[in-house]
Image (cartoon, rainbow, N blue to C red):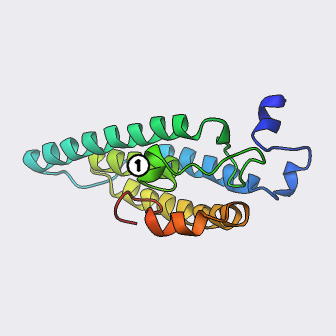
Amino acid sequence: MKFFTDWGFTAESWRGRRGEYWVLMQGLLMVGFVLVPVYGPTLPPALSVGLKAIALGLALFALVLLGKGLVDLGQSLTPLPYPREDGQLIQTGMYGIVRHCLYSGIVLLAIAFTLWQGSLSHLAATLVLFFFFDLKARKEEAWLTDKYPDYPAYQQRVKKLLPWIY
């Protein structure tokens, strides 16, 4: 149980005051993404190979974002969008490239899978994931702004979800 309390879960977590329902919805959307059937046109071989190469590059970058982002967060890691009481604002490493690198990694992996499969159904599911993480990040950033006075300056310097883009 200490593991969950360290992450911010409490006996009253069912009330959702720290974003517990965002975590639940995230899990459901990710399972849903995996269960979506692959649907898309048959692509010409040259286009298919090109998309697979792009997908592979994106997937590798996404895995670096996820892995290094987890390491960079260290003791501040929590699945909840509400910041840990003993947490620190991390602005270096992957968090110097994108503010929500774990969300970015998941979205980029979804894009990579979509390109690899050439799946229009997964393109739609990826858009749903992107908009969900954008909304979750907005909620999280409101809490981060309340806790860390220098968060607004960090928001101005570093993109939110897609490195160097958005």
Image quadrant occupied by the N terminus:
top right
Quick check: 103 left or right of 139?
left
Q: Which percent across, then down, holds residue 4?
A: 79, 35
Which residue is located at x 87 percent, y 57 percent? Answer: 15
Secondary structure beneath dot 1 equals helix
Amino acid found under the numbered disc labelled 1 = Ala
Quadrant position of residue 116: top left
Image quadrant occupied by the C terminus:
bottom left
Q: Nearer the viewer, residue 61 or 133?
A: 61
Quadrant position of residue 6: top right
Which residue is located at x 53 percent, y 39 percent? Answer: 72
Quick check: 116 left or right of 81?
left
Is residue 75 in view from this perspective? yes
Which residue is located at x 19 percent, y 42 percent? Answer: 53
Compared to residue 99, the image places residue 53 above or below, namely above
Which residue is located at x 10 percent, y 45 percent? Answer: 45
Q: Which percent across, then down, holds residue 46?
A: 8, 47
Compared to residue 80, the image places residue 160 above or below, namely below
Q: Residue furthest left?
A: 46
Number of other residues with Cα within 10 Å of mark 1, as a class: few under 14, some 14 to 19, many 20 or more: many
Q: Which residue is mark 1?
A: 110
Q: Nearer the viewer, residue 5 or 73?
A: 73
Compared to residue 143, the image places residue 80 above or below, namely above
Q: Which percent across, then down, holds residue 39?
A: 34, 52
The total of numbered circles placed on residues is: 1
Is residue 106 in view from this perspective? no
Compared to residue 63, the image places residue 84 above or below, namely below
Quick check: 142 left or right of 47?
right
